[in-house]
Amino acid sequence: MFSDGPGLSMAMWVNQSSTDDFILLGIFSHSPTDHLLFSVVMLVFTAALCGNVLLILLIYSDSRLHTPMYFFLSQLSLMDLMLVCTNVPKMAANFLSGRKSISFVGCSIQIGLFVCLVGSEGLLLGLMAYDRYVAISHPLHYPVLMNQKVCLQIVGSSWAFGIVDGLVQMAVVMTFPYCSLREVDHFFCEMLSLLKLACVDTSLFEKVVFVCCVFMLLFPFSIIIASYTRILGTVLSMHSAKSRKKALATCSSHLTAVSFFYGAAMFIYLRPRRYRTPSQDKMVSIFYTVLTPMLNPLIYSLRNQDVIGAMQKGLDRCRVGSQH
């Protein structure tokens, strides 16, 4: 199933990259309804871009947001920003131009970036739950337990985990020989959709990918469950209703983001293959590759007084500058 050596793998890769492009069947036709849906997706995409860029700039420019939680949040926004830019622009260009092709190299880049970003974001969301646990259960030791070195290790491990996973899966998937009919039933080069076009048996690799997906989703999810179980115990032991409300408020935004991301990802990758349909996969993929990156900045800004304060401060500074 795999190539006989690195030299042959490289030769196959170069040979395939110079042959026919893949065809992305997409998610929209050119009916009036689909034109409307495409416009909605592009509005959501624009909102995701603006929201995440704004949040990154606010966290970078306001010293009150230079804390571990907001550092993690800035990295989450960077991942979301890269995620929406990985697939949506190509999908939009194909829809508007009427061309549905994507080059072999472009397809491999999409696979690598997508796997990398989804893996990195999943692990970071899990480790952010640990940050909330330390902040609520051990507030006096928080500056020590979540010092700069620990924060950099958490972010660095999230990125490293995703990058390694993305490179490995991209390298393996793109060494398979693909048949002449290269129609990918998706709006981007989604790995499982691409494997259906391989001219060889990929069942072993698909089983390995499934095990990897289980680990990538359930390992961070177990950190989240463990952290919030401890947090709940701490909150229930608090005597002040005000303290309980404040503690729960700091967790609600993260829990909302986790629910959106893990709910969609588990639906896509942990279902048995016989229950998977291309139409369902494409709709859910739109949800967590476009809609969730738009919702995350809203979740963390509209429900967070610190971010709202930083935004107000930035607007006041712009008004003062315009008056002069």
Image (spheres, rainbow, N blue to C red):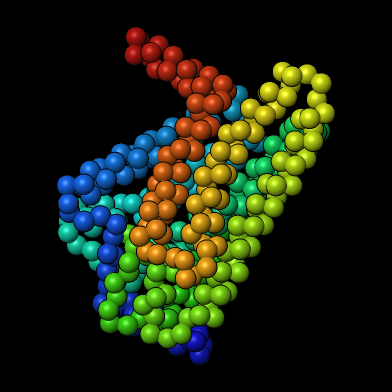
Q: In this orientation, which residue lies closer to the viewer: 293 or 249?
A: 249
**Against 285, is 63 above or below?**
above
Q: Position of residue 286 (x, y in %)?
A: 38, 51
> Quick check: 77 above or below 220?
above
Q: Is residue 254 left or right of residue 23?
A: right
Q: Position of residue 290 (x, y in %)?
A: 40, 47
What residue do we see at 35% from left, 60% from top?
279
Quarter of the view holding residue 204: bottom right
Q: Inspect this view and state whether residue 149 appears.
A: no
Q: Quadrant of residue 157?
A: bottom right
Q: Nearer the viewer, residue 102 or 211?
A: 211
Q: Quadrant of the C terminus?
A: top left
Residue 144 vertical position relative to residue 1 in the rendered view, above or below: above
Identified at 47% across, 17% down, the residue is 312
Tell me if residue 247 can be seen.
yes
Farthest front residue?
A: 275
Horizontal side of 215 relative to 264 (left or right) equals: right
Q: Quadrant of residue 120?
A: bottom right
10, 142: nearer the viewer: 142
Identified at 44% across, 14% down, the residue is 316
Pinpoint residue 24: horizontal percent, then vertical percent.
29, 65
Residue 8: % across, % down: 45, 88
